[in-house]
Image: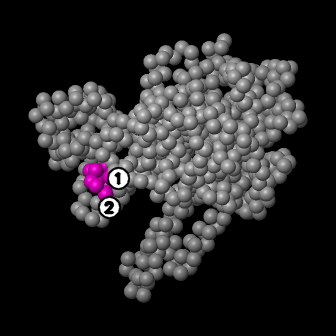
Amino acid sequence: MSLNDNLSLRSRQKATLGRMLHLNKDGAVDLTLASQSEELTWKVLILDSRSQAIVSSVLRVNDLLRCGVTIHSLINSKRSPLPDVPAVYFVEPTAENVRHIIDDLTADKYESFYINFTSTINRELLEEFAKKVALSGKSSKILQVYDQYLDFIVTEPDLFSLDIQDVYTKFNNPLTNEDEIHQLADTIANGILATIITLGNIPVIRCSRGGPAELVASQLDLKLRDYVNNSKNSSFNTSIQQRPVLVLLDRSLDLASMFSHSWIYQCMVSDVLDLRRNTIKVIKFTDNDSNNSTPNTTTKQYDIDPNDFFWAKNSQLPFPDVVENADADLNTYKRDAQELSTKTGISSFNDIDPNAPDADTANIQQAVDALPELTARKSTLDMHMDVLATLLKELEAKSLDKFFEIEQNYNDPKIQSQFLAILNSESKRDNSTDKLRTFLILTLLTDLPAQFSEECETLLSKKNSETAMNALKYIRKFKEIMKLSNIPLNEANTTVHDSHATKNNSALFNGLSSKLYGLTEGRITEGLSSLASGLKNLLPDKKQLPITNVVEAIMDPTNASNSSVQLTDDYLYLDPKSRGGHSKPPKRQTYQESLVFIVGGGNYLEYSNLQEWANTPNKPNKHVTYGSTGILTAADFLSQCGSLGRLES
């Protein structure tokens, strides 16, 4: 994914958390460092809901134990006193949390207090905190107070979210007042500031003009200047050969990608199932009666561990490749397990005889060393096999391949008649939202005939709610405004042809619908290698999304399209390290590292597309970190557009 995972945002956030849990000792950046070099200090960890989300995305219970954390609790829960144990607090800097800390201090709940705030505590609250600590008469118990600058959630090595709700709606709602707009921009700027401080290098800033991104960029520039001038952190004073670039963009740059269907594994899991903070929710329909409006369902939840080898290798690959790799990895596991069993006669810990003769000691030791890894590998593969099988059933039940085909070929003259046929067809499970999403993409990227558009809307309104149809009203209004502003909506959708891709995308769907749909959960492990190998050559053309073209134009202008470079030449240029004025004329140059941030919501599709570009074969790799105010599903963004569309009624 990144040039070096040690440089990834996730690894840096994890290191900062590790240092915090080792009581902010200098150099304690490894989760196991304290246990290796000194006696471990056992402690309790106190969190709030926000910090719990931050920690749980990158650390597991075993990681906490390695840092000496024996208990972790929410700050607003009932907690038993542990007067002989130090407590590490990692919470948001709010008045309520400060009150809880003072209450714990007054009650002598813990031996000592190490206070860590997720972001900067404002001066007024800090002074109030200090005053109450002094009044308690127990200030000697508070040994540390730190701003950790960790107020962001990392779910992939180079993907993060500020997890702020309804940002696109708030910025585009005419009823949002100016104070709310500036407060929201300030909150976003604080989140990006925390990310930059964690990454350890002050970037230059490039951003689109005249929208929320410019407002956020201006506030961030001031915050970075203040931080650089007042910080004692030497990491910002070292001479670095080249600084990264922060690319700040508005969601309005590309709405179509927010509704798109994708064949990338990670994107499909997020879209078809439910992927939230590295937890996959798998809902299985157990009622075979398709006419039953309330079929029976069972729900499973799977946790994607940061060390999940299969996810790391396959999350950003096309679905057919993942099916093939799953089959290959399962066969490798079976072979390794059989070899171990043949050599040692042991296939599980239950087979180990503690009274075995000395001659069997070596075999027992080999089994003890190998079985945990094999067991963990089998558990991971079983999870992904279940996820893949569920995806296959959903693809069939909702005919999702058809929507992908329409979206890939929106310029094809035949597409309108094909889409009408889809609208008039029924599927095993309701796919009315998928139909609406594809129609919104067609509306955004093409000029549809009025009669065709009206016919589609009539058919869609029969199955979609009024709230969902309000999204269509908003998208039409949005397109009108873009046209009046002479802003192209689909110019940036450049196709990058791959030597293995076919121009006839329909071949992919003929193969998938007739072959993959026949696979059930029990058959997914049988003979998939040959099937997936055949499908690999039928994958559609690779396309760079608009955001990727903008990033390419800024990071590598010599290889970008003229239209993209001309567009970004007009972007604002801010250098928080420069003296005097905040802005200067942009200078075309190449960058090896970038932080790309979308104000108004992003998704896994854009992250995947950026990583694919950054790691293009036969080209020098780039390091791109992608973030947004929130990582959204198509349903999430559809809801926001629906809220805005209601205002047009």
Residue visible at 62% across and 58% down in the picture: 620
Q: Position of residue 97 (x, y in %)?
A: 29, 32
Towards the viewer: 448 or 575: 575
- Residue toward you, 236 or 194: 236
Instruction: Please tell me whether mark 1 sits on a helix, a strand or a loop.
Output: helix
Q: Which residue is mark 1?
A: 18
Q: Left or right: 509 with respect to 330?
A: right
Give x and y (percent) for residue 412.
Answer: 86, 37
Check disc 2 and give the amino acid type.
Answer: Leu
Q: Are marks 2 and 1 in contact (CB under 8 Å)?
A: yes
* Quadrant where the image shows the C terminus: top right
| Magenta stretch contains residue 23 | yes
Instruction: State how the image is colored.
Output: one colour
Q: Which percent across, then down, holds residue 167?
A: 53, 27
Task: Determine the image quadrant of residue 146.
Answer: top left
Comes first in the chain, label 2 or label 1: 1
Q: Does the magenta stretch mainly form a helix, a strand or a loop?
A: loop
Residue at image x 63%, y 22%? 642
Magenta span: 18-28
Residue depicted at 58% across the width and 53% down the height: 622
In screen coordinates, is 207 left or right of 564?
left
Quadrant of the rendered image containing residue 361: bottom left
Q: Which residue is mark 2?
A: 33
Q: Amino acid at mark 1?
A: Gly
Image quarter hosting the N terminus: bottom right
Q: Does the rendering let one see residue 175?
A: yes
SS at mark 2?
Answer: helix
- On the rendered structure, is 194 left or right of 85? right
